[in-house]
Image (cartoon, grey):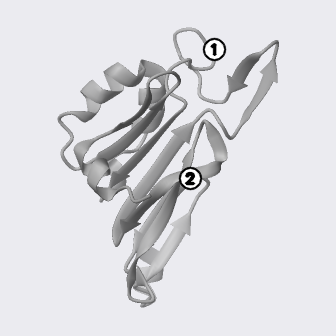
Amino acid sequence: MRVLKDHGIRNAMLNGGGDVLVSGQLQGRDWRIGLRDPRAPERILGTVHLREGFVAASGDYERFFMRDGQRFHHILDPQTGQPTRGPHGVALIARTLEDINGLGAAIMVAGAAAGRAMLEPLQSVDALIVEPKLGLWLSPGMGQRLHS
């Protein structure tokens, strides 16, 4: 984004495989980013409107295979070496990458309850956690951002 801005481009969206960086607007309106539902990845949970910042998604629904009825995905618990068994997905929004870099995977490893505790002091981060049985948890900021 810095290179684009150095070349005079003020309105841009960069999508890096689940992580999105936006600056400016698209045709005079904030960028709209769809958040996929990890329980049914062909659907979106809703959209967020953003003018400047990052949307980072982590989940067990993109890179996985099924074996003996168990999902094996790419986010591993370092204590067991096995795929995480916590949330199906996490979406985070922040103005800077430093606020959220690695946080989604950490929440996937730690679990939803620990993730909510990690997020509580982070006023600059809006979050969504999709839990296997409990459904959807939204931080107050994400609750205001997410549009159906």
Q: Nearer the viewer, residue 146 or 123?
A: 146
Secondary structure state at the residue bearing disc 2: strand
Residue lying at the far top of the rendered structure: 80
Q: Nearer the viewer, residue 75 or 87?
A: 87
Write the residue at 59% across / 39% down.
Answer: 38
Q: Are marks 1 and 2 in contact (CB under 8 Å)?
A: no
Q: Earlier in the sequence, mark 1 or mark 2?
A: 2
Circle 2 Cα neighbour tier, 10 Å, few/some/many (<14 / 14–19 / ≥20): some
Q: Quadrant of residue 6?
A: bottom left
Q: Which residue is mark 2?
A: 44
Secondary structure state at the residue bearing disc 1: loop
Q: Position of residue 76 (x, y in %)?
A: 59, 22
Image quarter in which the N terminus is found = bottom left
Q: Is residue 79 above or below residue 131?
A: above
**For the residue marked with disc 1, what is the amino acid?**
Gln
Position of 75 compared to 126: left or right? Answer: right
Q: Quadrant of residue 80?
A: top right
Q: Position of residue 18 (x, y in %)?
A: 57, 52
Circle 1 Cα neighbour tier, 10 Å, few/some/many (<14 / 14–19 / ≥20): few
Write the residue at 27% across / 55% down.
Answer: 144
Image quarter in which the C terminus is found = bottom left
**For the residue marked with disc 2, what is the amino acid?**
Ile
Residue lying at the far front of the rendered structure: 148
Count up the numbered dots.
2
Q: Is residue 120 above or below residue 94?
A: above
Write the residue at 56% across / 17% down.
Answer: 85
Q: Which residue is mark 1?
A: 82
Foreground disc of the pair 1, 2: 2
Q: Position of residue 16 (x, y in %)?
A: 58, 58
Q: Position of residue 74 (x, y in %)?
A: 66, 30
